[in-house]
Image (tube, helix red, strand yellow):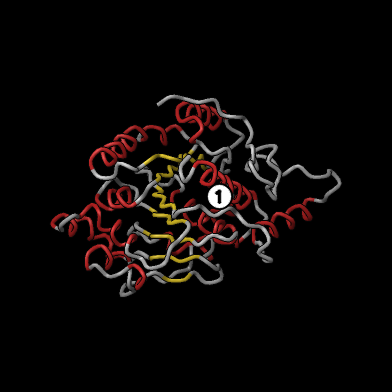
Amino acid sequence: MSAAPVPSSPASPAEAPLSADEHVSRETPVRDEDDPPLAMEALRAVQILNPSGEITMPRPDHPRVLCVANQKGGVGKTTTTVNLAVALALHGNRVLVVDLDPQGNASTGLNVPHHAGVPDVYDCLIDNVPLSEVAQAVEGIPNLWCVPATIDLAGAEIELVSVVARESRLARAIAAHPEQFDYVFIDCPPSLGLLTVNALCAAQEVLIPIQCEYYALEGLNQLINNINLVRQHLNPTLDVSTILLTMYDRRTRLADAVEQDVRNHFGTKVLNAVIPRNVRVSEAPSYGQSVMTYDPGSRGATSYFEAALEIAMRGVNTGGTA
């Protein structure tokens, strides 16, 4: 994969509500130095929550189905799925989140019930229940729906083995949904099993969150190999369109080294926005919220907002893939 030069600072192709002169995740947006920090934080919060609906992110001309995958656990797959989905929904896009992880963390982060007995994605995969019958509207976030995952999904890997066309069950369920979404985010489990294969077959794009630590790079080759196998045999349109660097700690040289390695290897597929280590991002799920609504003025919320805006702009400029 050839490396392409990447600008050291994000260049926003449209009039962005936040400064694009430098990484939002690393520095406070550039304002007048006389502005007090609280005023700047309040301004960011209003931009992110968008109560007036005036700030919109461009909508793609066709539905974009993104699989958020990385077989390594703890790299920010669920956090990325939830926050990007909320950011896009708050700014004028219709978004569906499919929780394909038996742990159900994306459902928790969106405050969607996913206890035993709740209709979930397992019913769609095993019993052909329509996706529209299990999708739930996310409270407080217009234009956002979630297909939850319950503990039943843990047995789906085994049960799918004997099912006809087992790799394309999710793809058919999404295609049969009567409503059209601008974005469908599929949150994958930290494995390369049949659930992840279903997600890769259903998606057009793969978004890979990469933690800015050495171990995060070790399993990346295996993930790329699996994606290539799925592309060759099951889903020829699949593309690794987006790489997002997460848990960036600007105090360490290691984070900078990992960032440079990833940018050199993946080139322009790597988003300019970088997600910092931020306690607000970690706290939000315990309140059943995304960081976008839990603390919209925080650096974590601002960074995910910038990442969502960049994904939206890339989709418009390149027809859906970066």
Q: Is residue 91 left or right of residue 185?
A: right
Residue drawn at 41 percent across, 48 percent down: 68
User: Is 143 left, or right, of 220 in this rendering?
Assistant: right
x then y, percent, for residue 44: 70, 54
Q: Is residue 277 visible?
A: no
Which is more toward the observer, 36 or 187? 187
Q: Amino acid at mark 1?
A: Ala
Neighbours of disc 1 within 10 Å: few (<14), some (14-19), many (20+): many
The residue singled out by tag 1 in the image is: 308
Which of 49 and 203 lies nearest the eye of the viewer?
203
Depth check, front residue: 215 or 114? 114
Instruction: Identify the residue at image location x=47%, y=35%.
Output: 213
Establish if 207 lies above or below 114: above
The residue located at (26%, 37%) in the rendering is: 232
Image coordinates for residue 18, horizontal then vertical, percent: 70, 48
Residue found at the far left of this picture: 162
Please determine whether, in this image, residue 94 is positioned above or below residue 40: below
**The quadrant where residue 184 appears:** bottom left
Whether residue 113 can be seen here: yes
